[in-house]
Amino acid sequence: MTPQTAIAPAGVELLLALEELRTLKARYWRYVDTKRWEAFGTLFASDATFTDHSAGFSCDGRDGIVSGISGVLDDIRTMHQGQQSELEVLGPDEARGIWSMQDYLVFPPGTPHPTNPQPVQSLRGWGHYVERYVRIDGAWRFRTIDLYRLRLETTTVSHTAYPPDFTLGG
């Protein structure tokens, strides 16, 4: 159904749909941060797509998204926060949204990152998720997720060796 022909929910049904979409996103961040990959997969339509435009990273399909994101983040401590959602229910089974976000990732020692050739100690990012949702069997699922970062900061581990014979006073 297209937004032009669909009848969007109103009243209490609209409020319920908006709350269900907020819960979907909250679970997304919690499941990523707690590494609950099986539960994470249940949040996506089978034909969903995920793209992180700053990293040039994308995944297709529910299984590809779970495999791709868990493969990158499984050994990394992460903390994701989302604020100021803009949600629009387009029809009974279709919605879209934009979320502002902030994330903080702490890497195991010596881990390289695709956007920085030096081993990265941590990464902090700010930006927006632009998403489309579909309701399948009465439950909202992600159809597309596009992550656009406005700022990305990395810290690297210092490799400066301390002089072994450096002494004061003699």
Image: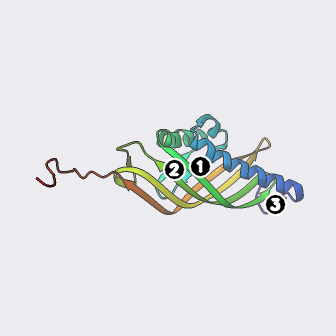
Q: Position of residue 53 (x, y in %)?
A: 50, 58
Secondary structure found at label 3: loop
Residue that sits furthest to the left in the current view: 170
In three-dimensional space, the C-alpha distance between marks 3 and 2, rounded to whole angstroms, equals: 31 Å
Q: Nearer the viewer, mark 3 or mark 2?
A: 2
Question: In terms of sequence position, does the residue under pointer 3 or pointer 2 come before the other?
Answer: 3
* Label 2 crowd bin: few (<14), some (14–19), many (20+), radius 10 Å: some
- Residue at position x 87%, y 59% from top? 10
* Label 3 crowd bin: few (<14), some (14–19), many (20+), radius 10 Å: few
Secondary structure found at label 2: strand
- Residue at position x 48%, y 49% from top? 105
Which residue is denoted by mark 3 in the rendering? 5
Q: Position of residue 129 (x, y in %)?
A: 60, 58
Which residue is denoted by mark 2 in the rendering? 58
Mark carried by residue 49: 1
Q: Say what amino acid the circle numbered 2 marks.
A: Ser
- Residue at position x 78%, y 41% from top? 137
Residue 13 in view (yes/no): yes
Of residues 149 and 137, the one nearer the viewer is: 149
